Image (spheres, rainbow, N blue to C red):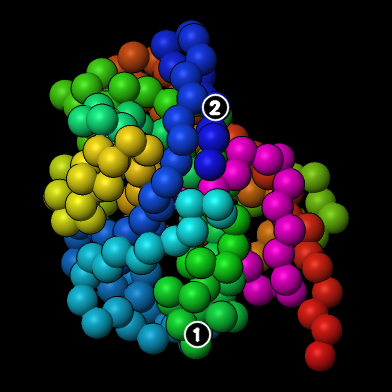
Amino acid sequence: MQMNFILDGGAVSFEIGHCTVAGWTGRDAKAIQHHIDELAAIGVKPPSTVPLYYRTSFGMLTQAPVIEVVGKGTSGEVEPLVIAKDGVLYLGLASDHTDRELEAHSVALSKQICAKPVANTIWKFDDVADHLEQIELKSWIREGDSDEWVPYQEGTIASIRPLSDLIEGSGLKSAGASGKAAAMLCGTFGAKGGVRPARSFKMAMNDPVRGLSITHSYDIVELPEIA
């Protein structure tokens, strides 16, 4: 699948042929337990081990401003996105949009059924490597018919297990050395007020050292569930 990005003010394209979603990647044990607890509150079973790597169809990655979902039980999560291509790493921004109702039955299936929105700007990983953990991630949701954006998530990459560990554990570099690029969503942190659906999701990744930001927003269209 072809994806186009803005990189250093220019354009770059990747043929993506592999996608992984890393789950349960919090660095702090209490933060992991908090996320486990908030998902347990909506019926999700705890993981067998942490972190876990879920293979997801690369065709679910999208840069569209609208995604369609089935039913009212889905929600987004702001996450770092790492892309590997021919030994070079890139850092971007994505949302692990997930079907929470299906998650109570199978986390793997819940990851595989929803589109994964991706921002259209990326950075070279080496350009941020020396201050990677200072990079900030934020998300907002718009609920109901209100136009007001409500703060939903906020933290830094320091809250997530070291990305170098996730890259190593997932085999991302090997997957991205086959002629096509490989992508991995790298996990998230808890939601303010608990995990819940929304009509719109907005996310940002801020580099305070270089004064740069990546942003993306998308609307969620609910398709009816037909019994």
Please state if 73 lies on the left or on the right of 162 as rendered: right
Which range of residues does the magenta coloring cover?
Answer: 61-80
Residue linked to disc 1: 104
Residue 137: x percent and y percent?
42, 40
Let me know if residue 64 is in the magenta part.
yes
Report the quarter where the C terminus lies: bottom right
Please state if 131 lies on the left or on the right of 68 as rendered: left
Write down the quadrant of residue 62 in the picture.
top right
Name the mark nearer the viewer: 1 or 2: 2
Which residue is found at the position 48% from the left and 67% from the top?
111
Which residue is found at the position 56% from the left and 54% from the top?
60
Residue linked to disc 2: 4
Residue 225 vertical placement versus 94 (above, below): below
Residue 114: x percent and y percent?
59, 62
The amino acid marked with disc number 1 is Ala
Let me know if residue 215 is in the magenta part.
no
Q: Secondary structure at mark 1?
A: loop
Q: Of residues 78 and 151, which is closer to you in this image?
A: 78
The amino acid marked with disc number 2 is Asn
